[in-house]
Amino acid sequence: MKLIEIHDEIFNRIEKALGEKVPVYDYLPEDERPPWVVLGKMVYNFPDTLASATAAGYVVTQKIHIVTEAEAKDFAIQIKKRIFKALEDGLKVEGLHILRQRFTGGEVSETEDRLYYAEVDFELWLQE
């Protein structure tokens, strides 16, 4: 299983797409003011439908969190669109075949502390 390689490819693509305007982290920044993007928990499972006689199959879901200040709802939407664009082409990880990839979620909502927040799941169906 190549979880680190998958994470690194997702991280690098998002970081490149957002440039210096929006920092990308794989931890929650404590003293940083928004906007920022955090790659959250990555989960995986092994559904029977992806297994074959010659290859192991699994599904990986990477949570992506987008946070902007309350005045910047449009900016949160723009960040989300840039992330979608950055990941629309199949990831390239040596030794993996991507059978399917998709986004789920992504609506932008205002939080009680007057920030805009979106959580997007990027799901990959893979075979090695």
Image: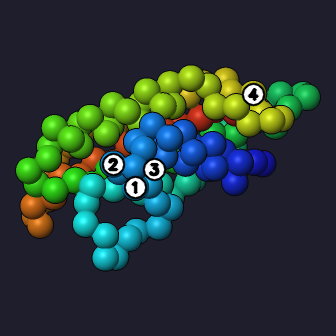
Which residue type carries mark 2?
Lys
Quarter of the image that includes the C terminus: top right
Residue lying at 75% horizontally and 48% vertically, measured from the top left = 2
Check residue 21 in the rendering and tell me which mark sits there, or answer none.
Answer: 2
Disc 4 versus disc 2: distance between alpha carbons? 33 Å
Q: Residue at the spot x=14%, y=47% of the render?
A: 72
In screen coordinates, is 26 left or right of 53? left
* Location of residue 113 (image quadrant): bottom left
Please provide percent x and percent y for residue 17: 45, 37
Q: Is residue 119 left or right of residue 107?
A: right
Disc number for residue 63? 3
Q: CA distance from mark 1 to mark 4?
A: 29 Å
Image position of 9 (left or right of 102): right
Check disc 2 and report its element: helix, strand or loop: loop
Of the two numbered discs 3 and 2 in the rendering, the one whose residue sits closer to the viewer: 2
Pinpoint residue 26: horizontal percent, then vertical percent: 50, 61
